[in-house]
C-alpha cells in the first residue's frame, strides 16, 4: 500500500508588519502593573515557570508605583535614576551627531532602553563585573563614569585608553566593572559565567552580569553559557535585552515567535523571569532580586527585559526599510524617561519646569565633554594614537615577525 504525503515546507518567520503597514503589538500579553507575584529569593526554578511568560511591572498608567515589586527607593535615588537616563540619551544624541559630522566612523544608540542599564547598575556593588554588549553605555553613565573617556574611545583619538584598537563604542573600563565589549556577539555570555565561576572558586563575594540581545540568543555561545551556569551554579545574572529587533530582523527569527526568551532557561533548570524594561522601578526591583540570589550563593538567574529599540541598529542602519516609521510611537510600554518623570511628578517631587531645566543642564554637560574630547582629536582631525601601538600589548615578548613588520613600517 502506497501512502502519498504532502510536500514538506519550512516555516520562515517574519515581522508581523512591514514598512507602510499599521504597527501592531496585539500579540503581546502585557499584565497590569502590580499583578505579577514576587516570589521569595530562594524559590526553586520549577516554581516560577509562569514568570517566564508574564512581565513584571511596577508603574501604572497614572504614574503610581503598585504591587509587590515596588523597590525601596527614596526620591533622591529616583532623581539620580532619571538623571542617568537623560544623560545617557543626551550622550547618544551628541555622539550620533558627531558621527554624521565625520568625527567618528560609527555609533550605536540605546534610545528607549536607558532604564535597563541605568536601573540595573544601581543594584550592583563595587567589584562586580558587567560583560556588556555595545548598547549598555548606561552601565557606565549611571555610575558617573567620565563622558570624555567614552568619547575619546569613540573618536579613537590620542587620549583613547584603548589606543584605537577597538571599533568605536566597544568600550572597556575595568575600574568600573565594565569588561571589554566584544564585537563577536554572544561571547560575553560565556565570559560572564566563567568570571563568576572564578569568583566562587576564590571564595570571593563579587558577582557577574552577562548581557546579550534577543537576536544573539540564537548563537551557540548563549547555550554553552547556560550549560555551565546550570551545572556549576555560579553567581551570575544572565540578561537578555529583547528590544524586538536585531540588525534588520524581527525577534521571531531568533525564536521569539514560539516561546519567550526567558523560557529558554527552563530546560537548564535556571530560574528566569521577564520584566518591563521601560519601567525603571521594575528594572531595579528585578535586578535587586537576582543580585541577592547570586550573593546568597543561590546560583544564576536569567532575565528577559522587554523593551523596544527606538533608533536604528547603528549609524549605518535605516530602520524605515524594514519596519513602519510609526512603530516606536505605538510601543505599548512607553518611554522610560517619561514614565519615571511622571512618577516623580505624582510624588510631588518633580515638575515639568525642573525637568526642562535639568535637560538643559545635561545637554551643556555633554557638549562640554564633547569639546574637551575633540581637543584630543577626532577621526579625521587632530592627534591620534601612533601606528606603533598596534604592536604593543599583544605579546609579553614581541615575536620576531612583528618586530620586523614594525621596522618595515618605520614606527
Image (cartoon, helix red, strand yellow):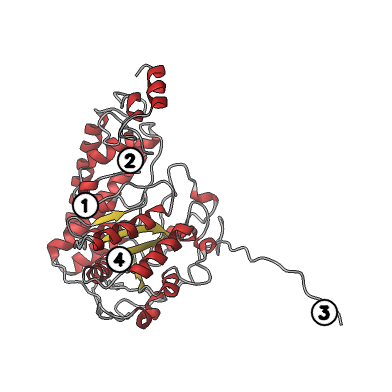
61 or 235: which is nearer to us? 235
Pointer 1 or 4: first along the chain: 4
Give me the disc on residue 3. Answer: 3
Q: Residues within 10 Å of mark 3 (few under 14, many from 20)?
A: few
Give the answer, above or below, for where 44 lies relative to 10: below
Estimate the spatial distance between the alpha carbons at disc 2 and disc 4, rounded to whole Å: 37 Å
Foreground: 82 or 288?
Answer: 288
Q: Is label 1 or label 3 in front?
A: 3
Q: Disc 1 to disc 3, how far (Cα)?
A: 73 Å
For marks 1 and 3 on the same chain, the one whose residue lies earlier in the sequence: 3
Separation of disc 1 and disc 4 at Cα? 44 Å
Mark 3 or 2: the one toward you: 3
First of labels 2, 4 by sequence position: 2
> Quick one: SS at disc 2?
helix
- Which residue is tagged 4? 234
The residue that label 1 is drawn on is 356
Q: Provide the residue designation for mark 2.
A: 95
> Mark 3 or 4 closer to N-term?
3
| Residue in view at x 37 percent, y 29 percent | 399
Amino acid at each position: 500500500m502506497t501512502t502519498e504525503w504532502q510536500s514538506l515546507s519550512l516555516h520562515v518567520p517574519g515581522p508581523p508588519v512591514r514598512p507602510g503597514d499599521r504597527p501592531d503589538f496585539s500579540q503581546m500579553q502585557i499584565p497590569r502593573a502590580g499583578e505579577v507575584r514576587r516570589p521569595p529569593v530562594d524559590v526553586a526554578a520549577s516554581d516560577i515557570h509562569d514568570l517566564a511568560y508574564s512581565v513584571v511591572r511596577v508603574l501604572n498608567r497614572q504614574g503610581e508605583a503598585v504591587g509587590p515589586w515596588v523597590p525601596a527607593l527614596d526620591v533622591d535615588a529616583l532623581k539620580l535614576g532619571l538623571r542617568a537616563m537623560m544623560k545617557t540619551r543626551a550622550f547618544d544624541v551628541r555622539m550620533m551627531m558627531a558621527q554624521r559630522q565625520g568625527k567618528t566612523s560609527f555609533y550605536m544608540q540605546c534610545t528607549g532602553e536607558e532604564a535597563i542599564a541605568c536601573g540595573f547598575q544601581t543594584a550592583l556593588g563595587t567589584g562586580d563585573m558587567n560583560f556588556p554588549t555595545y548598547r549598555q553605555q548606561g552601565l557606565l553613565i549611571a555610575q558617573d563614569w567620565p563622558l570624555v573617556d567614552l568619547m575619546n574611545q569613540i573618536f579613537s583619538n590620542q587620549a583613547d585608553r584603548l589606543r584605537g584598537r577597538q571599533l568605536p563604542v566597544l568600550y572597556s573600563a575595568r575600574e568600573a566593572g565594565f569588561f571589554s565589549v566584544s564585537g563577536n556577539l554572544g561571547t560575553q555570555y560565556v565570559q560572564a559565567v566563567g568570571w563568576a565561576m572564578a569568583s566562587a572558586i576564590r571564595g570571593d563575594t563579587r558577582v557577574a552580569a552577562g548581557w546579550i540581545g534577543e537576536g544573539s540568543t540564537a548563537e551557540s555561545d548563549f547555550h554553552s553559557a547556560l550549560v555551565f551556569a546550570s551545572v556549576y551554579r555560579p553567581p551570575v545574572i544572565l540578561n537578555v535585552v529583547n528590544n524586538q529587533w536585531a540588525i534588520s530582523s524581527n525577534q521571531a527569527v531568533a525564536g521569539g515567535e514560539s516561546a519567550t526568551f526567558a523560557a529558554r532557561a527552563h530546560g537548564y533548570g535556571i530560574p528566569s523571569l521577564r520584566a518591563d524594561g521601560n519601567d525603571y522601578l521594575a528594572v531595579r526591583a528585578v535586578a535587586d532580586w537576582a543580585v541577592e540570589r547570586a550573593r546568597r550563593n543561590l546560583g544564576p538567574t536569567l532575565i528577559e527585559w522587554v523593551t523596544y529599540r527606538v533608533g536604528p541598529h547603528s549609524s549605518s542602519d535605516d530602520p524605515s526599510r524594514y519596519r513602519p516609521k510609526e512603530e516606536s510611537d505605538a510601543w505599548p510600554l512607553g518611554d522610560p524617561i517619561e514614565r519615571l518623570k511622571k512618577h516623580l511628578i505624582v510624588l510631588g517631587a518633580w515638575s515639568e519646569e525642573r525637568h526642562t531645566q535639568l535637560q538643559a543642564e545635561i545637554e551643556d554637560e555633554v557638549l562640554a565633554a564633547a569639546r574637551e574630547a575633540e581637543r584630543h582629536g577626532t577621526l579625521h582631525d587632530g592627534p591620534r594614537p601612533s601606528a606603533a601601538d598596534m604592536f604593543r600589548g599583544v605579546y609579553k615578548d614581541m615575536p620576531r615577525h612583528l618586530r620586523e613588520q614594525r621596522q618595515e613600517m618605520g614606527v
